[in-house]
Image (cartoon, grey):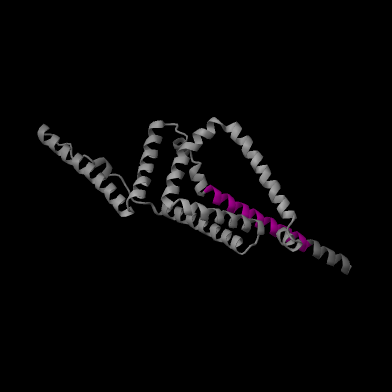
Amino acid sequence: MADSMTQSAQISSSQELADGQNSVAAKDSKMSDSFLSSSPVSLIQSPEVKDLVHWRDPKKSGVVFGLSLLTLLSLAAFSVISVVSYLLLALLCVTISFRIYKAVVQAVQKSDDGHPFKALMEKDVSVPPETFRKHVDASLTHINRLLKQLRKLFLVEDLIDSLKLAVVMWLLTYVGAVFNGITILILADILLFAVPPFYEKNKTQIDHYMEIARTQVNTTMAKLQEKLPGAIKRTKAE
């Protein structure tokens, strides 16, 4: 009788433990999905951005690419304060000139069309509290995820991942010796608008070689894990 009660208690506790693990896993999966849905990757994959980088509308993509590249080149040649000041000064020159031009036209034609920017001035430019809170929550999710990932990497929870980070940081020291931050941003801007059309035209061949490279990397990492000491492998498995 006592044995049956003990067995039933053990079964009940194991079921509760399994249910708890399942609920935690479901919660983690839900948090991961929400993070991915609000991550910068989802912004890059949005239809508007994809249309821009794939040059669906060449005129719009050309304007965005030209302005972004011009801004980055200006930042490479001048200070941030100078670039911002010149941009705002140019904008003011355009708006003031247009305002004077419309005033002269109205005076000559003796019309009363009102302020030329009246439609824009009547638009609501305030940020709704819901939108602000939404972006703050999304940013907080990114920060928490980043802090947890950094803790895992720098405290060597997974030796392989920490070694990968060390290799990347070591390679970045050579990149930093050749390029500065603005130069990297300029290259990234050019690649952002150049790579998607090229990939779209050569998708089959690129995917084939990428799969070969991925297989080689996975094979190398598997061989490296097999050569790890037993204690490290047990910690990784746990």
Q: Is residue 120 above or below residue 141?
A: above
Q: Residue at x 40, y 54 (%)?
A: 129
| First to last magenta residue range | 12-37
Marks counted in the figure total 0
Q: Nearer the viewer, residue 5 or 197?
A: 197
- The answer to whether residue 115 is visible is no
Q: Is residue 118 above or below residue 153?
A: above
Q: Is residue 31 magenta?
A: yes
Overall secondary structure of the magenta section: helix
Q: Is residue 191 above or below residue 27?
A: above
Q: Is residue 180 magenta?
A: no
Q: Residue at x 56, y 31 (%)?
A: 202
- Quarter of the N terminus within the rendering: bottom right
Please give left or right for residue 125 compared with residue 140 in the image.
left
Query: Residue 180: image x %, image y %?
Result: 43, 52
Query: Residue 105: image x %, image y %?
Result: 14, 34
Q: Nearer the viewer, residue 75 or 90?
A: 75
Please give left or right for residue 188 compared with residue 122 in the image.
right
